[in-house]
C-alpha cells in the first residue's frame, strides 16, 4: 500500500511537469501560445484537431509574423518598380511540430518555421503584359471640387497596376475596399434613389464607370453592372457603373488567355484608364461611345 502511494505521488509530480501549452517564438520572442486543450478534442490516444479553429490560429499567426510580398508595378513614367519577396509561416511543418508536441511534450518552445512568399506579378510578367493596349477610356472632372477629386484619386490609385489573370474576376468593391474617413475619403455629392445627396466617397462612381468603359472597349466579359437612378454628366447615358459598399458592385472577368493590366491615373481634370496585355493576343474590341465634351 505504501508503494502504491509513492507511485501515485510520482505520477502526480510528473503530471505537473507535463505542460498543456507551448510558446511559439520568432527570433527568440514569443509571438503566440499553443494550448492543446483549445485545439484538440479530448479523446484518449486519438489526436483529433479542431481544424477550423486551428486554421484561424494559423491565419492570425501569419498576419502577426509574416511579411507580404509586393508585386512589381509601374510608376507614373511607366518605369517598372521591381517586385519584393516576402515571408510566410510554413504551415505544414508547424502543424507537424505541434502534433509531435501533442505526443511527447519534450519541446520547451517551437520556433515558427518560415518560407519565402513570392509575388503574383514579377518584373518579367509586368514587362510582357504592358506591351499592348487593348482598351482605354477618358473622362473629365472638376479638379477644383476638392473633396470629390480626393475621392477619385484614392480609388484610381487602388485599381492602378492591378493584374487580372485568365479566368479571374475583378470586383471593384473588393479591390477598392470600404470607403471610410480613416482611409482618406471625404464627403462629396452622391446619387441616392434619384436624388443628389452627400456621403463619404462621393465621386468614385466616375472611376468605376470609366473602368467599365475601358474594359468593355477591351472586349472583356462584364459580369455585374448597374446604372445610376439618374443621368450623370461625365459619361454617356447607360454607360455608367454605379457602386456602393453595401449595394451595387462592378464586376468583370478576364475571358482571355493572357493576364491583363489595368493602368489608371489622373491628370489635371482627366481620369485616364487603360487596359494592357501581351502582344499577339487575340481579342475582340468593342466600339464604345465617346464621353461628353
Image: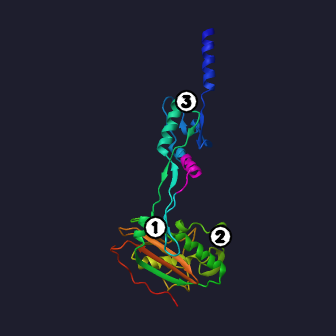
Return the x and y of residue 101 as percentages of the image width and height. 53, 33
Q: Is residue 241 visible?
A: no
The Cα–Cα distance between marks 2 and 1, rounded to whole angstroms, is 24 Å
Q: Which residues are magenta?
A: 56-68
Please report whichever mark, 3 or 2, sits nearer to the chain's N-terminal start: 3
State the residue in front, 43 or 290: 290
Please report whichever mark, 2 or 1, sits nearer to the chain's N-terminal start: 1
Residue at far bottom of view? 293
Q: Residue under label 3, please give it.
A: 106
Q: Residue under label 2, please give it.
A: 184
Helix, strand or loop at mark 2? loop
Q: Nearer the viewer, mark 3 or mark 2?
A: 3
For residue 121, which quarter of the picture? Answer: bottom left
Return the x and y of residue 96 as percentages of the image width and height. 48, 38
Q: Is residue 15 visible?
A: yes
Helix, strand or loop at mark 3? loop
Q: How is the image coloured?
A: rainbow
Amino acid at each position: 500500500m505504501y508503494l502504491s502511494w509513492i507511485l501515485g505521488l510520482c505520477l502526480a509530480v510528473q503530471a505537473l511537469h507535463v505542460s498543456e501549452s507551448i510558446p511559439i517564438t520568432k527570433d527568440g520572442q514569443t509571438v503566440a501560445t499553443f494550448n492543446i486543450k483549445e485545439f484538440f478534442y479530448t479523446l484518449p490516444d486519438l489526436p483529433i484537431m479542431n481544424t477550423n479553429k486551428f486554421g484561424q490560429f494559423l491565419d492570425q499567426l501569419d498576419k502577426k509574423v509574416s511579411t507580404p510580398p509586393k508585386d512589381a508595378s509601374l510608376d507614373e513614367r511607366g518605369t517598372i518598380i521591381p517586385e519584393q519577396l516576402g515571408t510566410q509561416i510554413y504551415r505544414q511543418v508547424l502543424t507537424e511540430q505541434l502534433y509531435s508536441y501533442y505526443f511527447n511534450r519534450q519541446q520547451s518552445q517551437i520556433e515558427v518555421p518560415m518560407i519565402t512568399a513570392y509575388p503574383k506579378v514579377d518584373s518579367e510578367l509586368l514587362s510582357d503584359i504592358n506591351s499592348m493596349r487593348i482598351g482605354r477610356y477618358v473622362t473629365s472632372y472638376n479638379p477644383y471640387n476638392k473633396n470629390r477629386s480626393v475621392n477619385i484619386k484614392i480609388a484610381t490609385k487602388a485599381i492602378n497596376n492591378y493584374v487580372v489573370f485568365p479566368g479571374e474576376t475583378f470586383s471593384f468593391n473588393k479591390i477598392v475596399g470600404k470607403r471610410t474617413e480613416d482611409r482618406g475619403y471625404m464627403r462629396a455629392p452622391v446619387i441616392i434613389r434619384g436624388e443628389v445627396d452627400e456621403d463619404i466617397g462621393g465621386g468614385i462612381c466616375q472611376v468605376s464607370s470609366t473602368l467599365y468603359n475601358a474594359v468593355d472597349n477591351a472586349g472583356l466579359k462584364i459580369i455585374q453592372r448597374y446604372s445610376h437612378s439618374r443621368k450623370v454628366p461625365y459619361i454617356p447615358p447607360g454607360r455608367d457603373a454605379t457602386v456602393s459598399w453595401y449595394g451595387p458592385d462592378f464586376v468583370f472577368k478576364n475571358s482571355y488567355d493572357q493576364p491583363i493590366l489595368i493602368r489608371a491615373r489622373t491628370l489635371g481634370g482627366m481620369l485616364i484608364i487603360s487596359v494592357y496585355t501581351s502582344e499577339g493576343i487575340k481579342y475582340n474590341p468593342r466600339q464604345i461611345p465617346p464621353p461628353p465634351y
